[in-house]
Amino acid sequence: MNDPIEHISKITPRYDFTWYLKWLSTILMLSAIIIRATGFFPVIDFICSTLGCLGWTLVGFIWHDRALMMLNGIACSLLLIGLIKLLVV
């Protein structure tokens, strides 16, 4: 019996700059979610979220992936506005 999963090949690059950037960005995003869940350190939450979204936006540019660019570019902009508002007020 043929297992269809055995025939799937990876398309995304491995161990190049984007591989490290996407994993660093993912770790930053997950860290921000954990910090947000505790309710403490909102500035660190915004910084980690913004940097994670910025990283994924750069990955989207390098991969020419419009969905990644749009989602993370807009999220990064909104998070940056929230960070500025948090620091100014």
Image (spheres, helix red, strand yellow):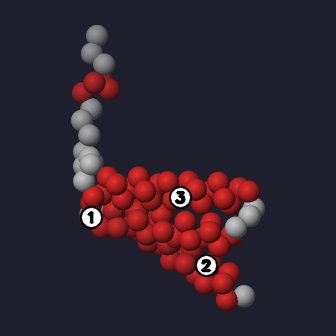
At a point 50% along the width and 77% down the height, the residue shown is: 77
Q: Nearer the viewer, mark 1 or mark 3?
A: 3
Q: Position of residue 78 (x, y in %)?
A: 56, 76
Quadrant of the image containing the N terminus: top left
Q: Is residue 30 above or below residue 71?
A: above
Q: Position of residue 71 (x, y in %)?
A: 45, 65
Q: CA distance from mark 2 to mark 3?
A: 15 Å
In terms of image quadrants, where is residue 87? bottom right
Query: Circle 1 — which element?
Result: helix
Residue type at mark 2 is Leu
At a point 24% along the width and 27% down the height, the residue shown is: 7
Q: Nearer the viewer, mark 2 or mark 1?
A: 2
Q: Is residue 67 above or below residue 4?
A: below
CB-based contact (under 8 Å), mark 2 and mark 1: no
Q: CA distance from mark 1 to mark 3?
A: 19 Å
Residue under pointer 2:
83
Residue under pointer 3:
29
Residue type at mark 3 is Met
Identify the mark nearer the N-term, 2 or 3: 3
Identify the mark nearer the N-term, 1 or 3: 3
Front-lying residue, 86 or 70: 86
Q: Position of residue 13 (x, y in %)?
A: 25, 49
Residue type at mark 1 is Ile
At a point 27% along the width and 15% down the height, the residue shown is: 2
- Mark 1: few/some/many CA within 10 Å (<14, 14-19, 20+): few
Q: Position of residue 25 (x, y in %)?
A: 44, 59
- Mark identifier at residue 62: 1
Front-lying residue, 16 or 61: 16
At a point 64% along the width and 54% down the height, the residue shown is: 34
